[in-house]
Image: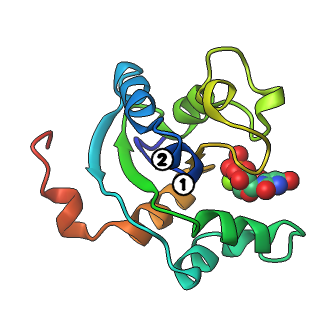
Amino acid sequence: MSNKTLAIIKPDAVNNEYAGEIIDKIIKAGFKIKAMKMTRLTVDSAEGFYAIHKERPFFGELVEYMTSGPCIPMALEKENAVEDYRKLIGATDPAKADEGTIRKLYAKNIQFNAVHGSDSDENAEKEISHFFSRNELLNNYTD
Ligand code: UDP
Ligand code: MG
């Protein structure tokens, strides 16, 4: 069981001014923010991040969406982080997400779904290093 996950407040949620409320929910759910920044992904970076989906029919639209404006990646820490954060955000499709989850509250549809969460410990590690250097992760007062 790992204790880290990579979260992203996606461009739709940043643009809709939901970032503050989403960060508040993450903190109140017991996650420590180990690193955070606001950044706009390049096409190369978004394609690399979602390489696992490159054969899927929605890949082009996903890259377009994720590069459409700034997003806020965060490295989060908590016991059982991957599973607990996926529970906090709810199903990929907000229509299927449980009441009170971040996607139920802030997502528009299965594409514009407000947030990302890693799906395994192995991917969490890869995704955290996609956005943050080792130094950025260590340079944190919660250590
Ligand atoms: N997505 C989409 N159409 C789909 C499925 C997914 O546009 O039919 C987008 C959506 O933004 C989703 C992302 O692609 O969050 C990655 O899909 P995945 O299946 O990994 O969902 P997640 O892990 O984000 O819940
Ligand atoms: Mg996924």
Position in image of residue 87 (x %, y %):
61, 28
Q: Secondary structure at mark 2?
A: helix
State the mark number for residue 11: 1
Q: Secondary structure at mark 1?
A: helix
- Above or below residue 67? Residue 92 is above
Residue type of the residue flagged with mark 2: Val
Residue designated by label 2: 14
- Above or below residue 131? Residue 25 is above
State the mark number for residue 136: none
Position in image of residue 36 (x %, y %):
30, 52
x 63%, y 49%: residue: 119
**What's the CA distance linking mark 1 and mark 2?**
5 Å
- Nearest the eye: 17 or 23: 17
Position in image of residue 30 (x %, y %):
36, 23
For the C terminus, which image quadrant? top left
10 Å neighbourhood of mark 2: few (<14), some, or many (≥20)?
Answer: some
- Nearest the eye: 76 or 83: 76
The reply to whether dot 1 and dot 2 touch (C-beta < 8 Å) is yes
x 80%, y 38%: residue: 93
- Above or below residue 21? Residue 98 is above
Q: Is residue 36 left or right of residue 79?
A: left
